[in-house]
Image (tube, rainbow, N blue to C red):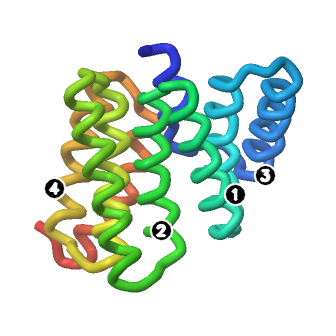
Amino acid sequence: MQADAEKVLTIAEDEPAVTLKDAESAKAQAERSSDRKGQAIATIQVAQALSLTGKPQEALAAVTEAMDLCEDTRFDVGRAAALALTARIVAAHGGGEDDAELALESAEDALRFFRRAGIRRGEAVALWSMARVEAAFGGPQQVVRCARESIALLQELGESAAEAVVNHTLADGLVAGGD
């Protein structure tokens, strides 16, 4: 389960266009070999890259497809990662009050799963997702709290590149008035 978590729990560091190309290639390969779990992993990566390249509708469609694949294969880590990603997609591309509620619930569901499963990297990603939702929809105190918790976990895991990304979210929260 931990190895699968590593594949789907990323905090984007690479160039989104390159990541998208690589993820689409991995998805096509998984489809050719009828590897449904591999398809789910690659589809989550495609969704993240689509979001980062400014294609939120396509990203949401891909993350929905990934969740369906995860359900079909009982790939719970992937489903939780897709929930956290849903939160970040909505946070990055805006929406109304209903969207904010969906995003926060998705991130909270992911966090609960990862805590129960003891997947620290998943906790860090879910907390970062919650911080991003709070940053997008107006909760600077919560941004700071969630980002700091995420950073602490990433430090424990030695994930310095991911930590740097989450530090940007923390800075946004501090600038917005979080303490």
Horizontal side of 179 relative to 107 (left or right) equals left
Disc 2 to disc 4, C-alpha distance: 20 Å
Pair 3/2: label in front? 2
Provide the secondary structure element on which disc 4 rests.
helix
The residue type indicated by label 1 comes to Leu
Q: Is residue 11 above or below residue 136?
A: above
For label 4, the residue is 145
The disc, 2 or 4, on the residue closer to the chain's N-terminal end is 2
The residue positioned 33% from the left and 52% from the top of the image is 107
The disc, 2 or 1, on the residue closer to the chain's N-terminal end is 1
View extreme (bottom): residue: 96
Q: Is residue 113 above or below residue 110?
A: above
Provide the secondary structure element on which disc 3 rests.
helix
Provide the secondary structure element on which disc 1 rests.
helix
The residue type indicated by label 3 comes to Ala
Q: How many marks?
A: 4
Q: Quadrant of residue 145?
A: bottom left
The residue type indicated by label 2 comes to Val
User: Does residue 170 appear anywhere in the picture?
Assistant: no
User: Does residue 125 appear anywhere in the picture?
Assistant: yes
For label 3, the residue is 17
For label 1, the residue is 50
Horizontal side of 85 relative to 72 (left or right) equals left
- For residue 90, which numbered disc appears in the image? 2
The residue positioned 35% from the left and 33% from the top of the image is 122
Disc 1 to disc 3, C-alpha distance: 8 Å
The disc, 1 or 4, on the residue closer to the chain's N-terminal end is 1
Crowd class of label 4 (few under 14; some 14 to 19; many from 20; radius 10 Å): some
The residue positioned 43% from the left and 14% from the top of the image is 1
Disc 3 to disc 2, C-alpha distance: 20 Å
